[in-house]
């Protein structure tokens, strides 16, 4: 069994077992009374800047977890690529930044999964290049994605698929944020973008009539999780216990509804 499947299976058993009080008494924190977390505030609607402050699903969630643990949630905003380095270097207690779980990362950190989310193909409302979804209609097109995100890996897989079929290559355009990808598509510099399903829902609400979804959701069972240092069982157990408490009292479900995520993102229903 892969390390990734084992970790997710263990979490499922933990969260379905008896309720244990969330507790940080055995955890070594960077700052006493504070839960210092690394975040890259560029991935709406999970974490982003609004009126000079961090906002988003993850920001609200870590606030709820901090209350359960009796600690103030304190963000350390940085580039996504620096998050694991910061965790391993002891600059943060955990990573809370909609981090997609994959085998490579699971070898560097321990995860506490909390959502599963898919990806959608988004085009301009009139779809001038007639893209029909994650299929051969993408070959020869330019796809905008967030640099280093899982959507970049999906786009590069699709480029390889087109090449292997002898079709035109995909130009994978990497950009700093999902918002940059949306602007690039709107300006016509890209033919499509890949983004998380919750991100697309938010985009459609903010600028109705500008974009359209092409095809159906894909990779819908991909999990995202908070990350702790490899082998830090005390921190992992504390976060799992706090997460279990917000699932049990209904605030986890309410948070999903508040951010207008589809109910299918829940790991615990």
Image (cartoon, grey):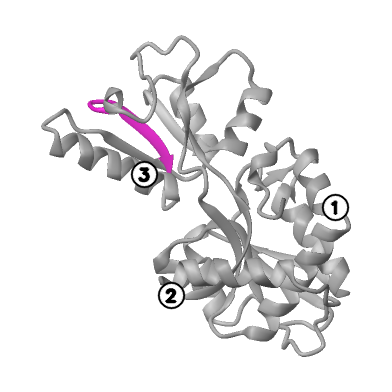
- Residue 136 falls left or right of residue 24: left
Q: Residues within 10 Å of mark 1 (few under 14, many from 20)?
A: some
- Closer to the N terminus: mark 3 or mark 2? 2
Q: Secondary structure at mark 2?
A: loop
Label 3 vs 1, first from the N-terminus: 3
Measuring 45% from the left and 50% from the top, which residue is drawn there? 149
Name above or below for residue 99 compared with residue 127: below
Task: Identify the residue shown where x is 75% and y is 44%.
Answer: 256
Q: Which mark is residue 107?
A: 2
Q: Is residue 109 above or below residue 169?
A: below
The residues tagged by marks 3 and 2 sit, at their Cα atoms, a distance apart of 21 Å
In the image, taking residue 172 as reference, residue 36 lies left or right, namely right
Residue ranking furthest to the left: 166
Q: Residue at x 51, y 51 (%)?
A: 222
CB under 8 Å between discs 3 and 1: no
Of 139 and 142, nearer the camera is 139
Q: Main secondary structure of the magenta part?
A: strand
Q: CA distance from mark 3 to mark 1?
A: 32 Å
Vertical relation: 62 (above or below) 124 = below
- The percent coordinates of residue 264 (x first, y second) are 65, 41
Q: Which residue is mark 3?
A: 154
The range drawn in magenta is 139-146
């Amino acid at each position: 069994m892969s390390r990734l499947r084992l970790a997710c299976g263990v979490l499922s058993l933990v969260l379905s077992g008896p309720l244990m009080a969330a507790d940080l008494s055995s955890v070594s924190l960077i700052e006493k009374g504070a839960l210092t977390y690394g975040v890259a505030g560029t991935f709406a609607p999970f974490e982003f800047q609004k009126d000079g402050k961090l906002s988003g699903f993850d920001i609200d969630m870590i606030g709820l977890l901090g209350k359960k643990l009796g600690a103030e949630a304190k963000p350390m905003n940085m580039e996504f690529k620096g998050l694991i380095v910061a965790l391993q270097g002891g600059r943060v207690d955990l990573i809370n930044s909609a981090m997609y779980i994959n085998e490579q990362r699971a070898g560097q950190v321990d995860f506490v999964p909390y959502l599963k989310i898919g990806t959608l193909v988004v085009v301009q409302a009139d779809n001038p290049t007639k893209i029909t979804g994650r299929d051969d209609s993408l070959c020869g097109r330019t796809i905008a994605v967030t640099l280093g995100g899982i959507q970049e890996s999906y786009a590069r897989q699709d480029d390889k698929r087109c090449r292997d079929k002898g079709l035109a290559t995909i130009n994978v355009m990497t950009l700093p944020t999902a918002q940059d990808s949306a602007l690039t598509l709107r300006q016509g510099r890209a033919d499509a973008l890949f983004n998380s399903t919750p991100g697309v829902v938010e985009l459609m609400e903010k600028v109705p009539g500008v974009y359209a979804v092409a095809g159906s959701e894909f990779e819908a069972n991909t999990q995202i999780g908070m990350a702790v240092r490899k082998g830090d069982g005390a921190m992992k157990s504390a976060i799992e216990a706090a997460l279990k408490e917000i699932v049990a009292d209904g605030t986890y479900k309410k948070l999903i509804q508040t951010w207008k995520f589809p109910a299918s993102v829940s790991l615990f229903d």
